Image (spheres, rainbow, N blue to C red):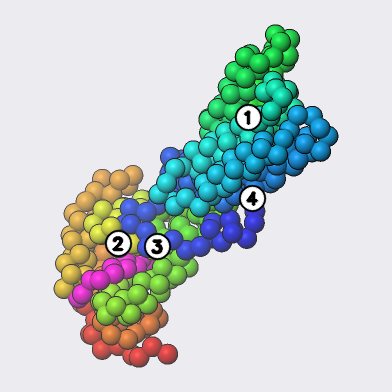
Amino acid sequence: MNKADEALALAPAPAPPSHATLPSPLDLSRLFERRSDRYLRRLLPGFCAVFGIAVLGAGLWSYLLGTGQSPGSLVIRLALVATASFTYRMPRSGPSPTGRASFVYFLHAVALAVSVHPLGDGVLEAMPTLFFWMVAAGLLEPRPRQCLRILAPPALLYGALGALMLPSAAAFAIWIACIAAPALAIMLGMASLRIRRETWLRERKLLSACRYDNLSGALSRAYLTELARHDLSLAQRHGHALAVAMLDIDHFKRVNDTYGHAAGDAVIRALVATCMNTLRASDYVGRVGGEEFVCVLPEAGAEEAAVCAERIRETFAGQQIPGAPSELRCTVSIGISVCRDRCDWETLLREADGALYGAKGAGRNRVVVAGHQHHQAA
């Protein structure tokens, strides 16, 4: 894994939506497809530049040996290779990476076939070079369907030229080569793809284990802090408010002692699910302790945060806990702190924690908003 891929895999993502949990298999599949497209887009210029040099070198070698190449055919080869190079500079909104690779490969295949006396000889001379680069396409694009899309046009072109220009025995050999090269490329690509996918999935699992709490699906404390500091910095830069709500399950130890830890785990999952279903798409929740959670609400003032927290409190208090005894009901106390000017993450947490203790001291199962005076950031 090179440094660019490592940075891409480990770079912090934007604030996740409220329903962010451990990625599903479908999400992982889509992420891997996007990563594969980025890999192909990044690798295509260098890979096909070497391909172009090989095409021009083969033509020059053929010309020096006096096998039928002419200066004119070399100029045509150079023009085709140069045309293919413009594909590298297309904007991202242009053709897909696979489409670009297919176009480049086809132009290089045409350039290889360019000859003067006669075209059939040009096909035979070009076939070894084309065969090698077709097999190498399995490393460029390991996904079977996309690899076949890249190699099908040049394979069909050479098969048609062989059938038109060569004796039947030679044409048959060309067809065998045009079938064998893509087949070998796909087999090579599938082996490479399996290694890449397994390595990437291990990286994603490790990353998810660092970023998410396995029990509840909430963000881990470290990842929550990373995202919150980023959002807090943006809020201060643009003069927006940002609210933090700290939640604590009331009498949680009593739940574990009375109903067992499995019921306590169900209560934790139920609270996080309530938060995820209540928060906005830009908000997120993280687990900072055994039964303590923090919700971050970018661009939310005290009134908006209090309304959201009250909705969480009411919903959680009125529900039956899935997976727990039917008679079990739990409540949550919530403390809110809001930053409007200059403050740091630790100050916000401390003030939200103070408001939370105020809520517990006032009888629990309530929402308390801290004062709005904050210390200046260090």
Q: Mark 2 points at which residue?
A: 282
Residue bearing the label numbered 3: 14
In front of the other: 348 or 86: 86
Of the pair 178 and 204, the residue shown nearer to us: 178
The amino acid beneath tag 2 is: Ser
Q: Which label's residue is closer to the chain start, 2 or 4? A: 4
Q: Which segment did they paint magenta? A: 289-302
Q: Where is residue 308 in the image (x, y as percent from the top left)?
A: 20, 64
Query: Is 97 located above or below residue 3 in the figure?
Result: above
Residue corresponding to mark 1? 186
Q: Name the mark nearer the viewer: 1 or 4.
A: 4
Identify which residue, 111 or 271, lies in the foreground: 111
Q: Element under label 4?
A: helix
Label 3 to label 2, Cα distance in Å?
Answer: 9 Å
**Residue that carries the numbered disc 4 in the rendered image:** 46
Quadrant of residue 136 in the image? top right
Earlier sequence position, callout 3 versus callout 2: 3
- The image quadrant of residue 122 is top right
